[in-house]
Image (cartoon, rainbow, N blue to C red):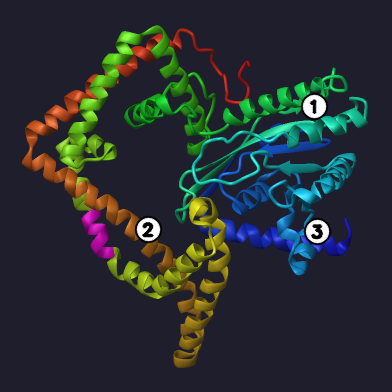
Amino acid sequence: MPALEKSVVLAVTGAVRLLLGAYFRRIEVYHADRVPAGPVLFVANHPGSVTDAFVVGTSAPRRPHFLATAQLFRFAPLAWLLHRAGIIPLNRREDDPAAMRSVADSFGAAHRVFDAGGVVVIFPEGVTYDDSRLRTLKSGAARLALDYEQRHAGRGGLHIVPLGLTYSAKERFRSDVLVFFGPPLPVANFLPQYAERRKECIAGLTEKIARRMQALLVHVPQMEREHTVEAVKRLYLPRLRLGNLIIQGPVPALTEEVVLTHTIADAVDFASREMPEHMAAFLARLRRYEGLLRRLHLSDEAVEELASHRRALPRILGWSAAALLLLPVAAAGWLHWRLPTQLVESLARRFSDPKKRKAQAPHARMLAGAVIYGAAFALYVGLVQRWLGWPASGWYALALPLTGFAGHYYLKQAALLLGSARTASVLLRAPLARRRVLRMRAALIRDIEQVRRAYRAVLKPGLEPGAVAE
């Protein structure tokens, strides 16, 4: 790699890591060991716009080259930077129908990366979106891979590695991200009959990629069972984490949620198929239980606290004492950063598509925040330096970020405190309602336990998403 290109890559990667570390609380990377040596094509879902490229680029165990829309290259300085960072322009039909001939040039550039044993990333959905559902894949990834292997008579050694990106709440500051690498697919296995049945082979590989990608995502695609799966997760996920047959050994929380969500979805399908009367009764009880919670203005998270006066009331008192002690620190942080935060939010809304605001919010906030928070920090420290001098300005500079994070988390915990106070009011005002809620919840958990015992009898230990039989 030329020295200039290497310097650009290191500088861009460092800046992106810094932005991601500030915006996200944690980025979990699971099964990066699945990425083989030699040429690799990553195929990833695209729920977070430019943020997806940031996350993949800094989480992959090998340096990736991205296929990105040619629209990004219309601004000459940005085009220079993107080329030096290894980004390959790709014309889509919606970008410029007359320029589709340049797709061959883009594929040729990707093939040269493969020839050098490198890694290319493509987002085969072709668009970004706000929710977590996997969209219909375009055929470009399969065509790119099969064309390369055909050129090398099946001896190119190219592997496709499906990649699942799951954001816990991408539009929210200090949320979590999961980067889940699936098992590699040897492209040569799909090459037979490609010359004679090109369209069928491309469609078959595209379908295989879609199934593998869906297995790596936390979202359950079938709308009719989504509510049931989410309800079972709220009621039972803590218990399911204990003694399950799916995950062997400790894994990060969001990774575990992806794996167990698919297990719950499979169990719901199993119960609907094998235990229809039991499932119907469970759904009826679930509707009554959720209706009661709405009438009492209680969340599912608060119901656990209803189980014991001894746990709920001391917790509320403890949170109240901590809130009073930390109020001055949080207030200082909130006052300092409120105006810059409002400006960042205003710019993020202005420069993002209203239809894709959740998807575009992270990178819009990161880029705007890097400028605005940096300028605010410099202004605050400069004023203190002028008025009070050194070392007061140094201590002030160290305290500014800490008080800012304290103010952010204080507001989040204040919402939990209000929920706990609401729970306490139910404990004190409506003991009969409390007992009824707990009885209904216990009955639902017994129903889930019955399905779990039946499902475990047919479950194979150690099975993971992305490695299932298809």
Position of the N terminus by quadrant: bottom right
**418 relative to 59 in the view: left or right:** left
Amino acid at circle 3: His
Q: Position of residue 66 (x, y in %)?
A: 74, 48
- Residue 290 circle label: none
Name the residue: 34% across, 55% down. Answer: 412
* Mark found first going from the N terminus, 2 or 1: 1
Nearer-the-camera pick, 173 or 71: 71
Secondary structure found at label 1: helix
Q: Residue 388 lies in what quarter of the image?
A: bottom left
Compute the Cα span from label 1 to label 3: 27 Å
Inspect the magenta stretch and tell me whether residue 134 lies in it. no
Identify the residue under disc 2: 409
Q: Is residue 43 left or right of residue 439?
A: right
x 19%, y 36%: residue:
306
What SS does tag 2 mark? Answer: helix
Q: On the picture, is 39 further left or further right than 349?
A: right
Residue 361 at x, y percent in the picture: 51, 56
Asked if the residue under mark 3 is in contact with the one under mark 1, i.e. CB atoms within 8 Å, the reply is no
Report the Cα–Cα distance between label 2 and label 1: 47 Å
Above or below for 273 versus 47: above
Q: CA distance from mark 3 to mark 2?
A: 39 Å
Give the overall secondary structure of the magenta segment.
helix
Residue 47 image point, x, y percent: 56, 44
Q: Which residues are magenta?
A: 319-325
Give the number of the disc on residue 83.
3
